Amino acid sequence: MERRAQGRRRMDAGVPARRRREMAAATSGAGRCRLSKVGAGRRPPPARVRVAVRLRPFVDGAAGENDTPCVRGLDSCSLEIANWRNHQETLKYQFDAFYGERSSQQDIYAGSVQPILRHLLEGQNASVLAYGPTGAGKTHTMLGSPEQPGVIPRALMDLLQLTREESAEGRPWALSVTMSYLEIYQEKVLDLLEPSSGDLVIREDCRGNILIPGLTQKPITSFADFERHFLPASRNRTVGATRLNQRSSRSHAVLLVKVDQRERLAPFRQREGKLYLIDLAGSEDNRRTGNKGLRLKESGAINTSLFVLGKVVDALNQGLPRVPYRDSKLTRLLQDSLGGSAHSILIANIAPERRFYLDTVSALNFAARSKEVINRPFTNESLQLHVLAPIKLSKKELLGPSEAKRARGPEEEETGSPEPPAAPSSASQKLSPLQKLNSMDPAMVERLLSLDRLLGSQGSQGTPLLSTPRRERMVLMKTVEAKDLEIERLKMKQKELEAKVLAQEAADPKEKENYSPTMLRPLARRTVTVAKPLKKAVVMPLQLIQEQAAYPNAEIHILKKKGRKRKLESLDASEPEEKGEDCWELQISPELLARGRQKILDLLNEGSARDLRSLQRIGQKKAQLIVGWRELHGPFSQVEDLERVEGISGKQMESFLKANILGLAAGQRCGPS
Ligand code: ADP
Ligand code: MG
């Protein structure tokens, strides 16, 4: 031992102090992070998340007469899909790579995955994620079958081969490979190699490495080793599920492969590269499956994490200063392996069948770098949207209340949509595309319209995801400033009115009883309510009272409260004034409440994140959650649906309603700006 230490001292003698510190850090483990061949301290430039799209072929001979594809490839990077809004147009999307229905497992692997593996041996991290609706080919892409092995077996084979070569006798580094396999289900991290472990925590060490303490790691030296651990673990995943398909399409399956390297000679550096291979949960709108209870909760958790994943990819690719990794377990886990110096590829899987149309559009929008509207029909037969709803139902059955409204006046609806439809060019095209919606499945109509609103609010060329947090912060600050000014102005006005009343009372106290108290009494009481100056809602009664003075058929009454007893007073009651300790409450007519609810609902369904933030109790995060929920589930059918938004509790929903209903009913805001 002592001799070894002496030897080390001798070796270090000729090395400058700084270099020695680096070496010490490297051997003690402190330098494990990112000691790549590029050299310590020189970080490679941040890598974008590359996005590839894979279109699978028709399966089970589905391509019959009634099922022509709704999407097709244009070249190795782009594809086009029919535009549901106007069948004279197609939408062209561009990606880093596009793999058509004829491409093989080897094409995808060699084109998009194999090139990133070598970075693992440089101590860098990498991730491969398969995204897309259930049935679009994620598992086929990642796992494949014995005849057509997918990304996972191919990557494992290559990595094991590479490590064997690199750590052969006489090579400077000794390499070892370990694997872990976990599942993220309902925002819980579950170890598939040791299912009894329960929900595991994700931690970050002082150097920004993400770790899961307690997660099983199995050393593997051959592909047989890998299969020995992986196959039973995959069965664990399915055994745990009450309904195999339901659960497996609702959880994210994460295979983690670590490559550890130790230098054989001084300075005995260590390196670690992590590879995440992820089969994501299905991105389809689970609302359409009529989910309730647990299923709905699951959908919420999946959709939240996929929504956050979209925002993370968007933030990384736009070079935004804040990347919201912490907003979901999945992205938190990937924090050191998605973006930064990591090499990541997202493979969006899509299906050609028309029944997948909505999910395909939504997957493309999730993944798209750019989108263009091209002025040409998709095919000679062009996409006839009514074909999308093969089930024949009566019009009444097809349309829910909101759709029925649309059916009455589709043109009116269209006025609000961002792009007017192209002029009809033949007798068969006389109907506007939206009129055709009448014959469609109502859930589909809702989704199309909400998708349309979302895309419209972002402009046809815009990136599909939400605007940047920074921009939103600025907008929020401006809104708060404007609100504060408005409150100040109303307070001043209120003071002026109070002063006027007091002056009048002082001038002629006898006349006091003859005054119409409509304005005066509440104003006198206002002095009491103003004792809570921090409540912004305090301005509302004044506005309502003023409104009431202007409209004799007022829908609001003021209730005088003394102790526990409450006495209804019409505003024009002429009883003598009560003592100062009385307080006042508002009683609002049901019609007014209904109006307020409707306005809130309209705002929830049509308002942008910015519009939503102008509501009481809705901050930036909640506004984004609402918009995200709407993007994934379609419009809210009632204001109480807010509770279904992940992150908004029933209590919060109630206090939100209380805080906003009156203001909106009284016409403070009339809808999205
Ligand atoms: P997901 O995992 O997205 O739910 P799967 O991978 O299970 O979808 O694919 C659904 C079906 O489609 C499976 O039967 C699968 O074998 C088949 N499939 C998917 N992609 C392809 C492809 N590229 N070529 C041939 N068959 C495919
Ligand atoms: Mg699958």
Image (spheres, grey):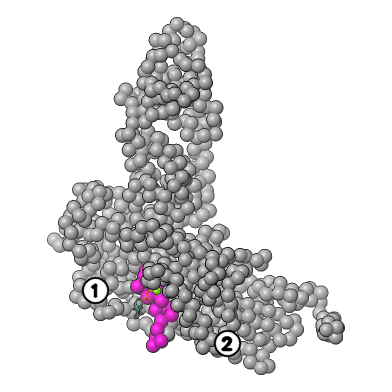
Depicted 562 relative to depicted 12: above or below: above
Q: Residue at x 40, y 84 (%)?
A: 145
Mark 1 or mark 2: name the one nearer the start of the chain: 1
At which x and y percent is residue 626?
42, 52
Q: Residue at x 27, y 49 (%)?
A: 402
**Tag 2: amino acid:** Thr
**Tag 1: amino acid:** Thr
Residues rendered magenta in the picture: 129-148
Q: State yes or no: residue 133 in magenta.
A: yes
For the residue pair 35 and 455, the one nearer the viewer reads as: 35
- State whether residue 538 appears in this view: yes
Please give the residue where the numbered disc 1 appears in the rendered image.
68
Quarter location, residue 419 = bottom left
- Label 1: which secondary element: loop
At which x and y percent is residue 162?
57, 87
Q: State yes or no: residue 575 in magenta.
A: no
Quarter location, residue 432 = bottom left
For the residue pair 531 and 215, the one nearer the viewer reads as: 215
